[in-house]
Amino acid sequence: MTAFVFASALLVLVVLAFVLRPLWQARPLAGAGISIAIAVVVGLLYVVVGTPRALDPAQREPIDRIADAIPMLQAELARDPSQLEGWRLLARAQADAGRLPEARDAFARAARLAPDDADVLVEAAESRAVANPARVFDAQALALLHRALKLQPMHQRGRWFLGIAQRQAKQPAEAAKTWEPLLAMVDERTGASLRAQIDDARADAGLPPLPAAPVEPAAPVGRSIAVSVSLDPRLAMGLPPDAVVFVIARQPGMRMPAAAKKLPAASLPQVVNLDDRDSPMPTLKLSQLQDIEISARISASGDATPRKGDFQATPAVITHDQQAAAVLIDRVVE
């Protein structure tokens, strides 16, 4: 703090010396007196209305503990209890701190402020179940879920929690009926797990399992390129353990890959097939390109971003009528 005050005073004097230069030249003593007086007044003004404690490093440490944030949120909400997001933040902080009843109460306040927000209603219902010693959805939680689904019938978390509540209430047929519409909304992996839960509920209700999921036709491969990737023996001795190799195809001059694959570097040499299914971008496919630049890079960290010390190949460029390429990883990224 002392160094800051000294540096600030020196800066004030320098500025005043420049501004009051004509006065200094004509009347040196008066110029010096005015400069010192102004510097003293500025310093006293900062002490009176400023925040000198802010210069203390102990006062400038960020809030890195949930317990530190909770009292601040509580104080702000005591000042203005109409802040919806404030109650949601407080509830999440309380939940993260393991204060489940307090989190339930904070979510309840949020739900009263936003009775037509399905997300808030579902959060409030979930918090009641989590805070319940038996981890069950009580009548109030069920009312919140039903209202949320009335507002937003296909709310995923709302339907999932309502199905759980129905299973807890020994209503397996209702639970299966609640969950079944979600199958059209989730990805394949989540859908497989959800289908198993639905079939268990249907079995408990004496119902047959759902019909088998239709098999989606395989996506067309489009253009395919066989890339032979090998590693210079001089670099093989320095190959980091668990390193991976990225094989990338892109339009020359562009950074965004049109196709990419990641595989263990220990598998080299290897022929890698790249096609339209390997594109990270649905709007950019190999089959759309005329000329294609093929490259390969070995990463010790497993990061797709090039780093110093990675091994890489000199890119090879092929034309639209070529279906194969070969690259040799023979240099170190500087």
Image (tube, grey):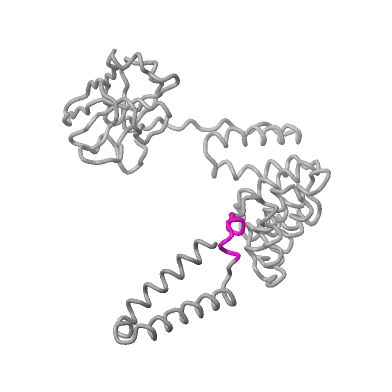
The vertical placement of 93 against 168, above or below, is below
Most common SS among magenta residues: helix
Q: Quadrant of the C terminus?
A: top left
Q: Could you tell me residue 329's position as x and y percent? A: 27, 21
Q: Could you tell me residue 147's position as x and y percent? A: 69, 60
Nearer-the-camera pick, 241 or 129: 241
The vertical placement of 106 against 296, above or below, is below
Q: Is residue 206 left or right of residue 232?
A: right
Nearer-the-camera pick, 207 or 67: 67
Residue drawn where x is 68% and y is 31% of the image: 208
The vertical placement of 244 against 127, above or below, is above
Query: Which range of residues does the magenta coloring cover?
Result: 53-61
Q: Is residue 173 left or right of residue 15?
A: right
Which of the 4 image quadrants contains residue 225?
Answer: top left
Nearer-the-camera pick, 308 or 173: 308
Residue drawn where x is 51% and y is 32% of the image: 214
Q: Could you tell me residue 231's position as x and y percent? A: 29, 17
